[in-house]
Amino acid sequence: MNLPRPVLISDRHGGKLTADGGSSTRLTGVIEVNDPGPTAGVYTISVAAELAGVTDRSLRLYERHELLRPSRTTGGTRRYSQDDLRRLRRITELIADGVNLTGIGKILDLEQDTKELRSDNTALRADNTRLQVDRDQQPRPERPEKESEPIQRRSPSRRARPITTANSPPDRADQARPASAAPDERHHDYAQHPAG
């Protein structure tokens, strides 16, 4: 089984590092160093406190009030990330403005919610724009001539009777029906028989 051996950096030549692998051969090349992400806990409590200009005790108090949630190593040591330091700077600004710790917690939660909603809104706007472009690029079907004619309204119901005035001629249906004919039972005249 071949395990990688530890390599010691022995010299720097023209921007390149020379590594000594413990043998007579020397390896040369560029050693890449990955920057930790903004959420990676890399700072101890004392370094984070110094960077933020607060005390270790203040950091523990903020953690107790759940304003900060640093990651922890397997041994339980707090590790603060760049995001934690950014949040810590906001906490110190709010304290300087006279906001108490409970209020700071609510403000930070609302700011986080607003940030997430803005992000969601931006994504939805992008989706909407993409869908509109897709819709506009699709060919529209030709409408037949019949659909381009104005829509005709339904004819009035057979039961509906036109309103007559004293000067209007009588309706043909009125002329065909004798005056003694009984009115249609389905059309009940509520004015003659009030509800009881």
Image: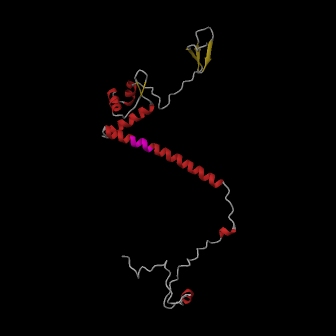
Relative image position of residue 151 (x, y in whole percent): 61, 71
Residue 110 magenta:
yes
Relative image position of residue 80 (x, y in whole percent): 42, 28
Residue 1 magenta:
no
Check the picture and name the quadrant holding the N terminus. top right
Check the picture and name the quadrant holding the C terminus. bottom left
The residue lying at 59 percent from left, 12 percent from top is 21
- Image: 134 above or below 24: below
Q: Tell me which secondary structure the magenta stretch mostly adopts.
A: helix
Q: Nearer the viewer, residue 193 or 63?
A: 193
| Residue furthest to the top | 24
| Horizontal side of residue 95 vs 169, given as left or right | left
| Horizontal side of residue 89 vs 128, given as left or right | left
State the scheme by which the image is colored: secondary structure
Q: Nearer the viewer, residue 190 or 17?
A: 190
Relative image position of residue 14 (x, y in whole percent): 60, 20
- Image: 121 above or below 67: below
- Image: 5 above or below 46: above
Q: How many marks?
A: 0
- In the rendered structure, which segment of residues is drawn in magenta? 109-114
The residue lying at 50 percent from left, 47 percent from top is 121
Q: Quadrant of residue 10?
A: top right
| Horizontal side of residue 80 vs 171, given as left or right | left
Residue 45 can be seen, yes or no: yes
Q: Nearer the viewer, residue 41 or 159?
A: 159
Relative image position of residue 25 (x, y in whole percent): 63, 10
Residue 54 can be seen, yes or no: no
Q: Nearer the viewer, residue 137 or 54?
A: 137
